[in-house]
Image (spheres, helix red, strand yellow):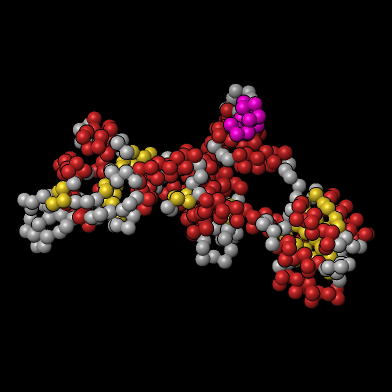
Amino acid sequence: MTRERIFIVEDDPGLAELLVEELDAEGYQVRHQDTAEAAWPEIEAWQPELVISDLRLPGANGMSLIPKIKGLPVAPAMLLITAFGTVNQAVAALKEGADDFLTKPLDMEHLLLTVAKLLNHRRLTTMVATMRAETSASTFYGMFGKSRAMRGLYQQIEQVAGADTAVLILGESGTGKELVARAIHAESQRAEAPFLAVNCAGIPAELMESEFFGHAAGAFTGAQKARAGLLKEAEGGTLLLDEIGEMPLKLQAKLLRVLQEGTMRPVGSDKETSVNVRLLAATHRDLEAKVQAGEFREDLFYRLETLALQVPPLRERADDRELLAQQFLADLTADKEQQPIFSAAAMDCLYQYPFPGNVRELHNAIERAVTFCNGNSIEKEHLPERIQQYQNDALHELSADTNGNGLSASQEEPAKALRPLSEVQQEYVRYVLRETSGNKRKAAEILGVTRRTLYRWLAEDSS
């Protein structure tokens, strides 16, 4: 890993030498200048993570560096050193943007702890800023994702939006099919007109025809007034028929007429009425199989299937899991003074679980974790039990497959069988890297994690 950079501005040669030696021994990259004028060009070019500056310097003092340093695109943290008599000036420097100050004579152990604290805070701040920037750049009409699968979906939405014809949206439950429909509407020429979404599975079969096509007054018992129906309510706009596979065959025939002729007949009426609405349909079922089973009209299926979009499941969007998890966490903790962060163990657990319930299940998992998290870190044990257990089962299975003697863990001696999960995980990571000839991109794909997670595992393995 790249060593963090620290720049020292100190005119006392003895103190400067001591600081350079101590910080270098701690593993930091260190540079030094004795005046603010000489330091600034180097700071600007080198872009350190931390600047340590004496408050009093020959020429311009340490205060003069604060606005310049904080004006950098990625500003370093700043630690001021001051004599006892100038503490009031140091407090003023904090108000100007310095991060902390220490008084002379310096306690080296205290200084090293302060340096570590400031660098850790800067890492967290930078990470949050990066995640927010990535989220902003990876948002498309309420959908979050930067994976290849999602970028392809965004492009398809833009392409079909202007066609003004029916679109079939396919995908597993919880993938966000309604969000796709809303995006199509928002990108279309009908964006200023109504968007209505209705779940066909939630309407009783005997009421469905009246709900969609409306009815004339007196058409049936209780129909005292005429009703326009959902198709007319969405006039000029877009109507999403979610779970269209649940629509009865009789209504499918009437829906096909709307698509082909742009007309419909309300229940109890003998007159056709025109309708101007774009129909979008969504389902998690295999409509082609329902056609073969005689449960869905073939002509309607092919009419809808002309423009079909497939929403990818979350298991095919490994690069999006952290982005989604961080976004859900931010949304769910927006009213908290301090937003918790995910521990490495919790995030690894989220990466490995296949999420059959997709994005909806991930959101629910984060909501549960936030509820049970009382501190500033979301840990693995805050996640739903099934997600924790999936990782435990997977690692135990890998332990049996990779112990090197062909025996399952239960067949080995007890002392060998009971190994820490972290040890089993690192062993499997090394095994995958050997099998991929050290290709980290391919290894990360096989492991179902991002390369950043793989690099973190490797760093932990070597420490």
| Vertical comparison of 413 with 45: above or below | above
Q: Where's residue 349, x and y in %?
A: 55, 44
Numbered range of the magenta stretch? 428-443
Snapshot quadrant of residue 408 = top right
Decide which of 79, 275 is in the foreground and name it: 275
| Vertical comparison of 430 with 369: above or below | above
**Which residue reaches farthest right?**
14
Query: Position of 355 compared to 299: left or right?
Result: right
Instruction: Look at 78% across and 72% down and name the residue there.
Output: 90
Snapshot quadrant of residue 14 = bottom right
On the question of residue 414 being in view, the answer is no
Instruction: Look at 15% across and 54% down and name the residue there.
Output: 214
Q: Where's residue 69, x and y in %?
A: 73, 61
Instruction: Look at 39% across and 44% down and name the residue there.
Output: 157
Give the quadrant of the C terminus.
top right
Query: Position of 7 compared to 349: left or right?
Result: right
Query: Position of 420 compared to 313: left or right?
Result: right
| Secondary structure mostly taken by the magenta-highlighted segment of the chain | helix
**Which residue reaches farthest top?**
406
| Vertical comparison of 107 with 274: above or below | below
Give the quadrant of the N terminus.
top right
Whether residue 442 is in magenta: the answer is yes
| Vertical comparison of 390 with 64: above or below | above
Q: Where's residue 393, x and y in %?
A: 53, 37
Instruction: Look at 60% across and 53% down and name the residue there.
Output: 130
Q: Where's residue 186, x and y in %?
A: 36, 53
Whether residue 368 is in magenta: the answer is no
On the question of residue 53 being in view, the answer is yes
